[in-house]
Image (tube, rainbow, N blue to C red):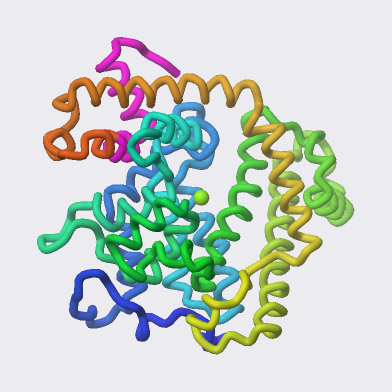
Amino acid sequence: MNRAPYASSAQRSRGRRYAEPDAPTRSPFQRDRDRIVHSTAFRRLVYKTQVFLNHEGDLFRTRMTHSLEVAQIARSIARPLGLDEDLVEAIALAHDLGHTPFGHAGQDALNECMAEHGGFEHNLQSLRVVDHLEQRYPAFDGLNLSFETREGILKHCSRRNAESLERSEPGGAGRRFLDRTQPSLEAQLCNLADAIAYNAHDIDDGVRSGLITVGQLQELDLFERHRRQAVVEHPDLAPASRQRRLLHEGIRRMLSEQIYDVIDATGLWLAQFKPDSPDAVRACPPLVRFSQAMQQQSVGLNRFLSSHLYRHAQVLQNTTQAQQMVRELFHAYQRDPSAMPPDHASREDLPRAVADYIAGMTDRFAAREHERLTGQRLL
Ligand code: MG
């Protein structure tokens, strides 16, 4: 399918914060994607935790492989819907750039440390990374991405943060959280593809780690249906020695079903609301969605992972130590800013500078810094 009228358009982009001449061969959204791939923050994702800490094994997802899987899933849905694939890819690859080391444990600890200083929120931090913290261009801070990419990166935002964004950039990326309107379809799609990706890969990683058993997965209708069907079609997958292959086949079928479901359900919503431009999309209710039946199954999947994996005793034990590390790092740099590199140490907004510095760390760098500053080795 060609580009649909409701798709975002690089030619009619709301543009960049600092005017730049167009590139001779690449569209603005392609160029955004390229800037993200070349950024320092993107490379750091290799060593940042998704669920399993980076040192726990080489084959678990990291923020980098998670982001690649989100981009793959989102593009698979974007093309048949006629959306802009370059924009989808740019948003997906950048959506987790603001994540702290140690996954959500790190973010929660940093948010607590920053309670009196405006808090810490990883979505807003992703936007800070591309707007301010990357330093690669002579004339401006950040990557100077197109509005549509920045809009997609900021997928959630508190009212207080939206008001503060609105003050610095009237009518900008924070505005929709005050107006309660939707972002582009490409942004909505990346949001859903994020959940589809982690629900699937966390099952795979959960089983790989031994924290989830294939037996437990049988309580999940969405997975179990496909596993059974795969055994019917391939009886040779039944023996225990071939369980790994069966697991992959089950997950693959489950992923495909969700992707086709989003394409169909979104097609119905688009046919009902008939948005004829990207701005018409912003005034509609959310249009990129699962069918109701799939939505319920997706919630079930997420609940299963919460109780069996995210709140597993072994994961929680790491959480406690990771949070201790982030807290102690925060207090150490607050006490002695000169323990940070000069560009952070010299900033006047010290708590925010410390938060930016810690948020940028990879898991292993944070652990090394923590040991250097406290003499204690954790994790
Ligand atoms: Mg994500």
Task: Say whether residue 253 is left or right of residue 10.
Answer: right
Residue 178 lies, in percent from the top left, at: 47, 63
Asked whether 340 falls inside the magenta stretch, the response is no
Q: Is residue 322 above or below residue 92?
A: above
Q: To which quarter of the image does residue 80 belong?
A: bottom right
Q: To which quarter of the image does residue 117 belong?
A: top left
Is the magenta region chiefly helix, strand or loop?
Answer: helix
Residue at the spot 42% in from the left edge and 35% down from the top edge:
111
Report if residue 275 is visible in the image: yes
Asked whether 378 falls inside the magenta stretch, the response is yes
Between residue 87 and residue 147, name the one nearer to us. 147
Residue at the spot 56% in from the left edge and 66% down from the top edge:
189
Q: To which quarter of the image does residue 332 belong?
A: top left
Task: Say whether residue 364 is left or right of residue 284.
Answer: left
Task: Say whether residue 155 is left or right of residue 348.
Answer: right
Residue 285 lies, in percent from the top left, at: 62, 72
Between residue 272 and residue 79, name the one nearer to us. 272
Image quadrant holding the N terminus, namely bottom right
Q: Is residue 276 above or below residue 197?
A: below
Q: Is residue 152 above or below residue 45?
A: below
What span is colored magenta in the figure? 355-379
Residue 265 lies, in percent from the top left, at: 72, 72
Residue 271 lies, in percent from the top left, at: 69, 85
Report if residue 234 is visible in the image: no
Residue at the spot 67% in from the left edge and 65% down from the top edge:
259
Task: Say whether residue 346 is left or right of residue 145.
Answer: left
In the image, farthest residue toward the top:
375
Residue at the spot 38% in from the left edge and 47% down from the top edge:
98
Image quadrant holding the C terminus, namely top left
